[in-house]
């Protein structure tokens, strides 16, 4: 039967861009050698997600982001402090295994994070790649105002649980060449130099003064979404792909991590 080690080895063996000695794609907790009959896939292994996967009978949960709130591979800092302590004890008691699939899946061609994000937004006419491996790309859309395109993006992501986008730029400016990236590896000046007139970013990778405001001063629109919103479609594709490769394992997608919601001030 398939083990967590088998799944990890498959992902890394097909990701020549990953440095095995430095990757964060490691087992975070649990015995990777035990057979797996049912596995969960998620963007973020929030405690609610972990419990849902356990209740569904999953012996393994494959996540994209850190389980213990630290990007470095060991993820040791919060394991013995709350809320990590409660999470760790639950995982130990249940025997669940946690595997992170981040460095491999970010750049996976066609169905990895970037290309799944573009496909989910309906961006199919790719006209330019970035110079780094599948981090950024630019697409062509019909001429429209920034306001119209931002509304389009907001409508597309609504099923993912995000109720709005934030926008910087003249709402009436005409845009036709959006660019996007992979999670925190947001598009930047290179894509502007290539002709992008609106950049789609996530908050975790685009602080206001260091990134978004600087891009706005270049005359380019900026649309910002939550990190998970830009990567959940990619993780759904990971579940589908692993189901096709490891046919003896039942893979299920979980999306129980907390979502943001917005409140607008009342008119005066």
Image (cartoon, helix red, strand yellow):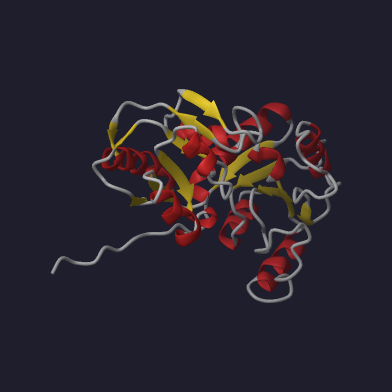
Where 121 sits versus 59, above or below?
above
Q: Determine the image quadrant of residue 246.
A: top right
The residue furthest left is 268
The residue closer to the viewer here, 113 or 232, is 113
Image point (74%, 40%), residue name? 37
The residue closer to the viewer here, 153 or 258, is 153
Residue 140 lies left or right of residue 81; in this view the side is: left
Q: Is residue 58 visible?
A: no
Quadrant showing the C terminus: bottom left
Image point (52%, 51%), residue name? 227
How many numbered marks have been drawn onto this rendered protein structure?
0
The residue closer to the viewer here, 78 or 243, is 78
Quadrant showing the N terminus: top right
Residue 214, how many percent across, how many down? 45, 53
Where 155 sits versus 129, above or below?
below
Residue 124, how many percent across, how many down? 46, 24
Residue 148, how many percent across, how many down? 27, 38
Q: Is residue 175 visible?
A: yes
Residue 165 lies left or right of residue 57; in this view the side is: left
The residue furthest bottom is 81
Where 213 sits versus 197, above or below?
below
Residue 8 lies left or right of residue 240; in this view the side is: right
Residue 51, how many percent across, how many down? 61, 58
Q: Determine the image quadrant of residue 11.
A: top right
Q: Determine the image quadrant of residue 262.
A: bottom left
The residue closer to the viewer here, 130 or 32, is 130
Image point (79%, 44%), residue name? 4
Image point (44%, 49%), residue name? 215
């Amino acid at each position: 039967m398939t083990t967590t080690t088998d799944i990890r080895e498959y992902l890394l063996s097909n990701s020549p861009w990953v440095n095995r000695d430095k990757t964060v794609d490691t087992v975070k907790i649990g015995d990777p050698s035990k057979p797996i009959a049912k596995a969960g896939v998620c963007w973020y292994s929030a405690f609610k997600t972990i419990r849902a996967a356990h209740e569904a009978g999953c012996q393994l949960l494959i996540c994209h982001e850190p389980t213990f709130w630290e990007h470095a591979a060991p993820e040791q800092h919060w394991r013995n402090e709350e809320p990590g302590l409660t999470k760790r004890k639950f995982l130990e008691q249940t025997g669940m295994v946690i595997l992170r699939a981040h460095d491999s899946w970010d750049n996976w061609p066609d169905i990895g994070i970037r290309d799944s994000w573009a496909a989910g937004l309906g961006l199919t006419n790719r006209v330019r790649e970035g110079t780094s491996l599948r981090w950024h790309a630019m697409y062509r859309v019909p001429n429209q105002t920034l306001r119209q395109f931002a509304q389009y993006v907001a409508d597309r992501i609504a099923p993912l649980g995000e109720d709005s986008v934030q926008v910087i730029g003249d709402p009436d400016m005409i845009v036709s060449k959006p660019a996007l990236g992979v999670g925190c590896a947001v598009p930047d000046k290179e894509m502007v130099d290539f002709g992008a007139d609106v950049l789609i970013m996530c908050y975790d990778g685009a602080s206001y003064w260091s990134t978004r405001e600087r891009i706005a001063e270049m005359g380019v629109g900026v649309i910002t979404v939550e990190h998970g919103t830009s990567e959940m479609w990619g993780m759904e594709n990971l579940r589908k792909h692993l189901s096709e490769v490891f046919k003896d394992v039942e893979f299920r997608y979980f999306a129980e991590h907390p979502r943001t919601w917005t409140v607008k001030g009342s008119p005066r």
